[in-house]
Image (cartoon, grey):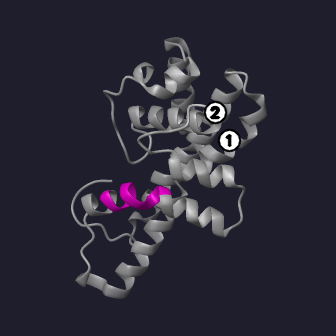
Amino acid sequence: WSGGRVAIACSRGRRLSQALWRPAGAGAAGAEWLARRLHFEEIADHAFLAGLLHDLGKLLLLRVLDELHAEAGEELELTEPLILDLLNAFHADRGAALMEAWDLPEIYSRVAREHRAESFDPDDLLLVVVRLVDQTCARLGIGMTHTPDLDLAATPEARCLEASDVLLAELQVLLEDALELAA
């Protein structure tokens, strides 16, 4: 993601796809690892799939924007900030709706819908795990968001899971390694 106008369909298609799928793979691996490391074996397999799919709405929105751009041509200016704003504002609900349309189990659409919500159910372990992994990816710059100053240990998710500094450091290393493998 860099600079100026974005014609989604051009040669950037591969880069945009990687900007979504490489972090999805890392998020899936991280969510499953975190669930197992915290001895939540009953959700570990679900954590993998929820980590993989929680940002599915971004892919859907990019596809819609690509089609709109193809129809409108140069008349539709899609700047990077506009695209990022649209993705951030609508991907959670649109991803959840897509999963519901595909008749995926509700646990996945719930995670997609609520993974960026301001408040969350601290008893929903699957959601809390995916939220913490998503925040860790953002801290590391894995994906379209980069918040390097985020104090993971201070997040409500880390506190809910009683995640130690050591565990959070291990998670960061795992995510970086998973991203390198996906490259």
From the viewer's side, name the closer residue of 133 and 113: 113
- Magenta span has 2? no
Q: Which mark is residue 125?
A: 2
Q: Give the amino acid type for the residue marked by disc 1 in the picture.
A: Phe
Q: x and y percent of residue 155 in the render?
A: 43, 25
Q: x and y percent of residue 7 in the render?
A: 32, 71
- Asked which secondary structure carries label 2, the reply is helix
Looking at the magenta stretch, what is its main secondary structure?
helix
Q: Which residue is mark 1?
A: 48
Q: CA distance from mark 1 to mark 2?
A: 13 Å
Q: Give the amino acid type for the residue marked by disc 2 in the picture.
A: Leu
- Asked which secondary structure carries label 1, the reply is helix
Q: Residue furthest bottom?
A: 71
Question: From the viewer's perspective, is residue 24 above or below residue 76?
Answer: above
Horizontal side of 138 relative to 44 (left or right) equals: left
Horizontal side of 24 relative to 81 (left or right) equals: right
User: Badge 1: few (under 14), some or many (20 or more) residues near its Cα, within 10 Å?
Assistant: many
From the viewer's side, name the closer residue of 149 and 26: 149
Q: Which residues are magenta?
A: 85-92
User: Badge 2: few (under 14), some or many (20 or more) residues near its Cα, within 10 Å?
Assistant: some
Q: Quadrant of residue 25?
A: top right
**Of discs 1 and 2, which sits in the foreground?**
2
